[in-house]
């Protein structure tokens, strides 16, 4: 069977990543990892323009503010996206960025988060959770769940409706969004009405290596199998059980009663099958879940909207699903 021909934009990203091995965690030493974790994408100036070429520019008509909330260990930074147009209480979407639990920041999600804010007419709260390996599991999980609780308690101040809460995350952030949805159900926490899981890492067990999409990941576009193994080693300690649902939501024994989900997957992504299997598990548990499969896209394609022709259709599918679950004002208001 012939492999699909890469679209021009994806070929460009692939060549750029392979020509600059420092982009891959596989080729980072400890000092390089520390630099990558502390590097800040500028909000203005030439650096912001260059970054915008690769990761997209924020949507016009959306105000972006930085804030933080007090967690048990200290303040956790937030990036908050609010449409400029006046409106009544809006839906609120809590977002968790990708980066293998060890890289990334909320700033890299400006394109996705600002477009969701504008197109859904919602407040988006993006969380800069603690990163591994300095902060291993369950630090990121704790920060993200606490952020959901804080956001629900302060939604009114943000111009949002605390009864219309959604979760969203890409890659490692998709893992965290799925986990937080289960935590909210288990703990009787804030009622989440929707989860948008974008190429989520739902299985951190050895079983992932048997997935067809993992075995067939010979191109390693954006995310190689070696990258995934390193990210996993950073996030998990030797005593952690990878089948714990807080690490691998695919292995949760009970997925019933969770919010409806849209699961975006990419055909050239080693995590493709993990995302599809999680959606199937949700449906088997009686949860409405829809898979949006973009067959010739790599992992992370929504982070490169100018190079990925399917970034906008994928975003439109996410917003359509969010609108179905979150769009109508709550009855009690």
Image (tube, helix red, strand yellow):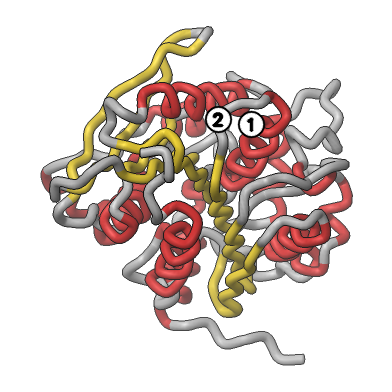
Q: How many marks?
A: 2
Q: Is residue 193 visible?
A: yes
Query: Dot 2, crowdedness within 10 Å: few (<14), some or many (≥20)?
Result: many
Which residue is at a point 34% across and 57% down the rendered structure image? 120
| Relative height, residue 161 to residue 300 (above, below) | above
Which residue is at a point 67% across and 49% down the rendered structure image? 201
Disc 2 + disc 1, Cβ < 8 Å:
yes
Q: Relative to the observer, which residue lies in front, 191 or 299? A: 191
Q: Is residue 132 visible?
A: no
| Relative height, residue 12 to residue 153 (above, below) | below
Q: Report the residue marked by disc 1.
A: 184
Q: Quadrant of residue 261?
A: bottom right
- If the image is split into quadrants, where does the C terminus sit? top left
Name the spot of residue 326 as percent of width and height, x first. 44, 52
Query: Dot 1, crowdedness within 10 Å: few (<14), some or many (≥20)?
Result: some
| Relative height, residue 190 to residue 275 (above, below) | above
- If the image is split into quadrants, where does the N terminus sit? bottom right
Q: Relative to the observer, which residue lies in front, 57 or 245? A: 245
Q: Report the residue marked by disc 2.
A: 190
């Amino acid at each position: 069977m012939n492999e699909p021909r890469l679209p021009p934009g994806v070929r460009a990203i692939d060549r750029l990543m392979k020509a600059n091995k420092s982009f891959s965690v596989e080729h980072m030493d400890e000092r390089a990892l520390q630099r990558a974790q502390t590097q800040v994408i500028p909000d203005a100036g030439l650096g912001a323009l260059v970054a915008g070429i690769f990761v997209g520019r924020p949507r016009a008509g959306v105000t972006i503010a930085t804030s933080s909330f007090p967690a048990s260990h200290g303040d956790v930074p937030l990036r908050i996206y609010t449409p400029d147009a006046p409106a009544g209480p809006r839906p609120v979407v809590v977002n968790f960025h990708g980066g293998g639990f060890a890289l990334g920041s909320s700033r890299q999600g400006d394109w996705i988060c600002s477009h969701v804010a504008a197109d859904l007419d919602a407040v988006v709260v993006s969380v800069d959770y603690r990163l591994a390996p300095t902060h291993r599991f369950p630090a990121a999980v704790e920060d993200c769940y606490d952020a959901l609780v804080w956001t629900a308690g302060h939604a009114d101040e943000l111009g949002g409706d605390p009864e219309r809460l959604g979760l969203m995350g890409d890659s490692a952030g998709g893992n965290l969004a799925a986990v937080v949805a289960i935590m909210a159900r288990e703990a009787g926490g804030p009622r989440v009405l929707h989860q948008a899981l974008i190429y989520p890492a739902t299985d951190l067990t050895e079983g992932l290596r048997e997935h067809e999409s993992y075995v067939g990941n010979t191109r390693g576009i954006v995310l190689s199998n070696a990258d995934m193994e390193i990210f996993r080693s950073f996030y998990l300690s030797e005593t952690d059980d990878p089948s714990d649902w807080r690490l691998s939501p695919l292995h949760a024994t009970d997925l019933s009663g969770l919010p409806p989900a849209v699961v975006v997957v990419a055909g050239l992504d080693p995590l493709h099958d993990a995302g599809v299997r999680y959606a199937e598990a949700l449906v088997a548990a009686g949860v409405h879940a829809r898979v949006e499969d973009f067959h010739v896209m790599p992992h992370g394609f929504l982070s490169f909207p100018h190079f990925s022709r399917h970034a906008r259709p994928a975003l439109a599918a996410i917003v359509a699903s969010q609108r179905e679950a979150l769009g109508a004002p709550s009855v009690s208001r």
